[in-house]
Image (spheres, coloured by chain):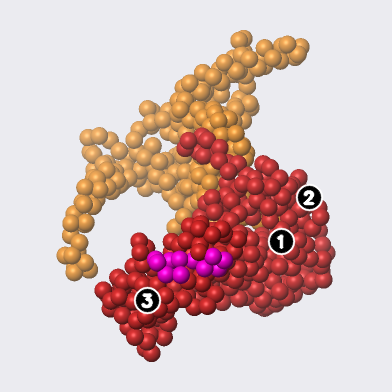
Chain colours: A orange, B red
Amino acid sequence: MKKEFKRNWQLYLMTVPAIVFLILFCYIPYGGLWMAFTDYNIIDGIFGSRFVGLNNIKFFFSSSTGLGMKSVRNTLIINSWGLVLGTIFPITIAICFNDIANKFYKKISQSVMFFPYFLSWVVVGAIIYAFFSTSTGIVNQWINSFGGDIVRWYAEPKYWKPIIIAADVWKWCGYNSIIYMAALANFDSTLYEAAEVDGANRFKQIIYITLPLLKPTVVILTLMAIGRIFFGDFGMIYGIVGNNSLLYEEVAVIDTYVYSSMRTLGFSYTTAIGLMQSVLGLILITISNHFAKKINEGEGLF
Amino acid sequence: MAKEKKGVRLEHISKIYKDPKTGKDFYAVKDANIEIEPGSFVTLLGPSGCGKTTTLRMIAGFESPDEGEIYLGNEPINALTPNKRDTAMVFQSYALLPHYNIFDNVAYGLKLRKMDKETIKKKVIDILSLVGLEGMENRMTNQLSGGQQQRVALARALVIEPGVLLFDEPLSNLDAKLRVSMRTEIRRIQQEAGITAIYVTHDQSEAMAISDKVIIMNGGLVEQISTPQEAYYYPNNKFVADFIGEANFLEGVVKAQDVVEINGADVKCATGSMEKGATCSVVLRPEGAFLGDNGQVQGTVKYSCFMGAYQDYHIQVGNTQVKIQEYNPKNKKIYKVGDSVFLNFEENTLYAL
């Protein structure tokens, strides 16, 4: 070890800035997690404030509005659907794009699918408003032209989980399909030719060759998404629903709830919730990694 | 496998590609006329880019010819998809499904043909014993060596009982020793199965070792179709002479039927139908001449090196340097650089182009 260090000290020296950065911005702030277990006030400081144990987290689940528990539920529902549909659609699109023979058309359709990635959630929110606005929205005009009764979308909470999930999948679809297309491009083309000789049609080639070969990529990406399943997309919820109090309860995720309660309940409380998200994510990802290794011939995330 | 052997016939086959850089069309294969007899082992041989793989892929059905017609037996097959052609292919990269074991890889084609389980099992076991993999059905493909994977690929192609078996450089991913034993193995299996085989390679010794006939291609053109011996002794042109084995080209003038003057000396040389007075290139193989203090054509030693089995010489004759290999050098006089020597030609070794 000492010898190794002596021989390659220049290389080790190069890691110093990165290590300093990590210590400064990732490990030292860990000390601040202590706040989660205290009743923090700015005068006594992080370590001087009164220790309250897990009271902050208890309060989250027992708060009178029940919003804490609801936000956990909403986060899990929205993210789980996003995870499932956000895997199926990009793979389908990647496979379809991969089979487009005309290069020009392939590039154009790829760019069109990728485009939503560049939009901010605020813009997406505006687009959704253009669709669902009660008086001027496209959807209501459409319903009207068929003689149906218009829907007051922004006053009906039950529609908004599907709308948000759809927007989420739509925005990331093209971006995620790029990852799958890169994987597809690496597959040996003779595998398909051999299957063609054996008499497999395009559909069977997808079932028997493409999907099994994509499995490791899908598993890794899914594991990474599971690690973040307790983290709601704050920008997405605020960009689409904003401060609409009618819809708030239906779509509030942990992160938006933390944001709104930080102003009234303070730092300790929100730190506790952030810590809880990470710990739960860690537990989930460890469990799913264990199962992933079983179905993926020992290949997991770690 | 009692199946009717099928021949393959290519009539005026051409394939045109677009050069991606210049955007110009060029012939990858031009006006190829090839007749392959049923049950024979034929090799498409040539340097990279000569059109051999394109030709094979057209026979397999992965490419369609722009001109001409391909026949399998007496049936024109241009319009048929690969699985309707009664051909099977062994790929360079083996093309095995990584998530299947050996049995499932071999059985895949049969399953798609909707055979019943018992038949499939029997056929797969039979084929695996033919290629020397009996008892290994349950291994995964990533637990196999390169040679074993190639055997699985061969079994997978054979099991669907094709009329014609196509090989696309199947041995080029194996190490040199395994290549030699696998090519003997492929030849044995082909003869046992009694199947027509078309084999693509750029390795001329591989082609010579296994083929009944070689088809030598260059720049999209078929240069010669013949037995390996004919290609070696009677090449159609300089390219074939140079590509098959090593060749020296001596400048000469035809003096009479089967007599050519080389560097002032008249020597016996097959001239075919060449006219008297015509200039020609005389093909001389390195082992086709021996050196002596006197003899037919004079030259000067430019290079002399002991190689174990033979002594390697470069001899300046007129304007050309000639490579000569004298085998068993222990019993022969060794010439040094600068020595003046005479070349003596073995009977029937010179061939004028």
| Lower position in the chain sequence, tag 3 or tag 1 | 1
Residue range corresponding to the magenta coloring: B256-266
Q: Of discs 2 and 1, which sits in the foreground? A: 1
- In this orientation, does residue B99 appear? no
Left or right, B53 with reference to B33? left
Q: Give x and y (percent) for residue B179.
A: 53, 72
In depth, the one of A124 and A184 nearer the eye is: A184
In depth, the one of B288 and B17 nearer the eye is: B288
Disc 2 marks a residue whose amino acid type is: Pro
Report helix, strand or loop for mark 1: strand
Q: Of discs 2 and 3, which sits in the foreground? A: 3
| Lower position in the chain sequence, tag 2 or tag 1 | 1
- Please give the residue where the numbered disc 3 appears in the rendered image: B342
> Residue B343 lies in what quarter of the image?
bottom left
Disc 1 marks a residue whose amino acid type is: Ile
Q: Give x and y (percent) for residue A110.
A: 54, 32
Q: Residue at x 50, y 64 (%)?
A: B255
Q: Residue at x 67, y 67 (%)?
A: B41
Disc 3 marks a residue whose amino acid type is: Phe
- Please give the residue where the numbered disc 2 appears in the rendered image: B76
Magenta segment, principal secondary structure? strand
Q: Chain of mark 3?
A: B
Report helix, strand or loop for mark 2: strand
In magenta stretch: residue B127? no
Quarter of the picture holding the N terminus of chain B: bottom right
In depth, the one of A214 and A299 nearer the eye is: A214
In depth, the one of B96 and B50 nearer the eye is: B50
Q: Are marks 2 and 1 in contact (CB under 8 Å)?
A: no
Q: Are marks 2 and 3 in contact (CB under 8 Å)?
A: no
Q: Residue at x 76, y 53 (%)?
A: B71
Numbered label attached to residue B36: 1
